[in-house]
Image (cartoon, rainbow, N blue to C red):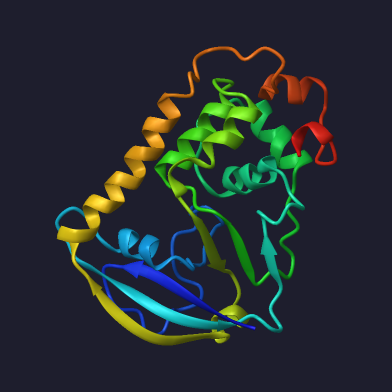
Amino acid sequence: MKKQLFHGSDHIIETPIYGVGKKHNDYGQGFYCTEDIALAKEWAVSEEKDGYVNEYEIETNGLHILNINDGSFTLLHWMGLLLNNREFILAREAKRYITDCFPVPLAGVDVIIGYRADDSYFSYARDFISGVISYEQLGKAMQLGSLGEQYCLKTEKAFQHLKFIAKEHVPSAEWYSKKMLRDRNARNGYKDMEKETYHRGELYISRIIDEEMKSDDLFLR
């Protein structure tokens, strides 16, 4: 099966190079794309600089693809990936519990599909870890602003299945404001959640740890 993917950047990337890129991105080192061209255009621009959307076609047959959002995993599995790759300032016990009890099997995985942990998603995760919001509130927050999913190509094999199709210039004057609007909508929705108010009966990180909840716990589904 072939899928159309887009990558927003400040330059044209006809041949993505395996083994380069930041190691502390959401799912580690890899090449990050999306199926949503509008999201890619927003990612491509900064306040004062135009960018490009690079369009690709990927042949998924023969690839081991792990979709963290396919219902087989919980939000704590997604968070465990972030904790392993991005820098959090948080309680060690919370980090240890999530990474130990909600591991994601990555051996042999060529492509990871999952939430895009931009500044908004990252702040939701940080607040949950800190005990500011409950697991239920985290789930609601993840739906705010249509912040989207991303594909992360992890292996040389995945790169070999990727074919460059076209490029498109993306003007900052048009797309930076859309980028900021999407982020602002997510942040405003989060503010309206009354996150500072304790929600009796809901799952907070302290309860999850105290009750030693695991990935098969129905409360986490």
Give the quarter of the figure containing the C terminus.
Answer: top right
Left or right of 213 on screen, residue 16: left
Task: Please give the name of the residue rendered at 47% of the width and 66% of the height, measured from the top-left corner.
Answer: 34
- Picture quadrant where residue 207 is located: top right
Q: Is residue 49 above or below residue 153?
A: above
Identified at 49% across, 58% down, the residue is 23
88 or 31, nearer to the observer: 31
Residue 83 coordinates in the image, percent (x, y): 59, 42
Location of residue 14 with respect to 65 vertically, above or below: below
Q: Nearer the viewer, residue 11 or 23?
A: 11
The answer to which image quadrant residue 80 occupies is: top right
In terms of depth relative to the viewer, which is nearer, 1 or 88? 1
Front residue of 108 and 151:
151
Answer with left or right where residue 191 lies relative to residue 69.
left
State the image quarter where residue 36 is shown: bottom left
User: How many numbered marks are there?
Assistant: 0
- In screen coordinates, is 106 left or right of 50? right
> Residue 103 location, x and y as percent?
74, 48
Residue drawn at 75 percent across, 43 percent down: 102
Residue 47 place in picture, x, y as percent: 18, 53
Task: Point out the image quarter for the N terminus.
Answer: bottom right
Where residue 100 appears, as percent x and y from the top left, is: 76, 40
Question: Which residue is at a point 82% across and 27% down the rendered structure image?
Answer: 212
